[in-house]
Amino acid sequence: MNIFVAQLNFKIQSESLKQIFEEYGAVTSAKVINDQVTGRSKGYGFVEMADDDQALHAIEELNGAEVEGKTIVVKKANPRPEGGAGNGGGRRDFRSGGGRPQRRFESRN
């Protein structure tokens, strides 16, 4: 199960995030998301746990817990939109009309 973790202290790195969740079961992966330009943490990340029961227990126990001075938010991650990152991700196509419906004008002759 993929778990979303928000409101992380900016000092927390991926390895620390993994250790927090390992108390509840085997962690497949843990990743704190960093800003591409600054390299600084964005304050959220994702944890993958193979056992759904362990993952649900971790969510229940850690949601609202204080970690490194911040109350974190922990919940089941929503699946990525079809197409994934970089492929529009299900976004509307704004190329025609700047995101607004196109208006049709007809000449009155």
Image: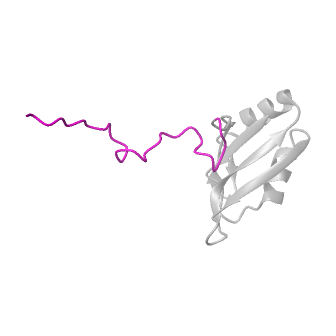
Q: Residue 14 falls in which quadrant of the image?
A: bottom right
User: Which residue lies at the image location 70% right of the left edge and 66% below the top edge?
Assistant: 11
Left or right side of 19 for 38: left
Left or right side of 79 for 93: left
Measuring from the top left, give residue 76's x and y in whole percent.
70, 34
User: Which residue lies at the image location 83% right of the left edge and 29% below the top edge?
Assistant: 52
Q: Vertically, is 107 above or below 66?
A: above
User: Which residue lies at the image location 85% right of the left edge and 52% below the top edge?
Assistant: 19
Q: Residue furthest left?
A: 109
Please give the count of numbered marks on the rendered protein.
0
Q: Vertically, is 89 above or below 15?
A: above
Q: Is residue 33 magenta?
A: no
For the magenta stretch, what is the residue range? 82-109
Measuring from the top left, give residue 37's x and y in whole percent.
61, 71
Secondary structure that dominates the magenta span? loop
Measuring from the top left, give residue 35's x and y in whole percent.
63, 64
Q: Vertically, is 40 above or below 18?
A: below
Measuring from the top left, give residue 30's x and y in whole percent.
81, 51
Choose between 70 and 87: the one closer to the eye. 87
Image quadrant containing the C terminus: top left
Q: Residue 28 falls in which quadrant of the image?
A: top right
